[in-house]
Amino acid sequence: MTTVRIEVALVSDTSAIVDFLTEVFEVESEPPMDTAVGVLYRIELPGATLKVMVPPNLPSPGPVQSPYEGTGLRYLTLYVDALERTVERALARGAELIAGPLDTYPGVRLVLMRDPFGNYMEVVHSTIG
């Protein structure tokens, strides 16, 4: 069996994160869908789909019994073709630069940042492969 698609989901207490992601990474979001557990937003990326679920009741932080009870993710890695411009857009929209830009390997530069909603993102530009 071969994996043919990957989707990553995060839960948020606001849909504002969808605007942040689409503006910073210059991608489009599909129209939101009402589901049994909240409003689902889908952001199509090259090779993957990022889903944002906004449940009707405010999620609480900490250990959870269901994936819809807490917010966030550990970190998301996004590869971009223009690191500096992407970081500029993120900072202008309230992101915080945690580390970088770092040259980790020849041809690979990255930053670690936290979006305005507390999620960590590793943003990478690579000229390798």
Image (spheres, helix red, strand yellow):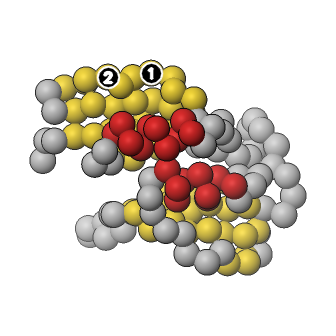
Q: Which residue is mark 2?
A: 102
Comparing 5 with 85, the one in front is 85
Comparing 7 with 85, the one in front is 85
Identified at 84% across, 63% down, the residue is 56
- Indicate the secondary structure of the residue bearing disc 2: strand
Asked whether residue 66 is in view, the answer is no
Q: Are marks 2 and 1 in contact (CB under 8 Å)?
A: yes
Query: Measured along the vertical axis of the image, is residue 90 above or below residue 14?
Result: above
Query: Measured along the vertical axis of the image, is residue 85 above or below residue 40?
Result: above
Residue 14 placed where, x, y %? 75, 55
Asked whether residue 27 is in view, the answer is yes
Residue 97 placed where, x, y %? 51, 27
Question: Which of the 4 image quadrants contains residue 105?
Answer: top left
Within 10 Å of the Cα at label 1, are there few (<14), some (14-19), or many (20+) other Cα atoms? few
Q: Is residue 86 left or right of residue 118?
A: left
Q: Which residue is mark 1?
A: 99
Question: In which quadrant is the N terminus drawn?
Answer: bottom left
- The amino acid type found where label 2 is placed reads Leu
Residue 23 placed where, x, y %? 52, 56
Identified at 33% across, 63% down, the residue is 47
- Indicate the secondary structure of the residue bearing disc 1: strand
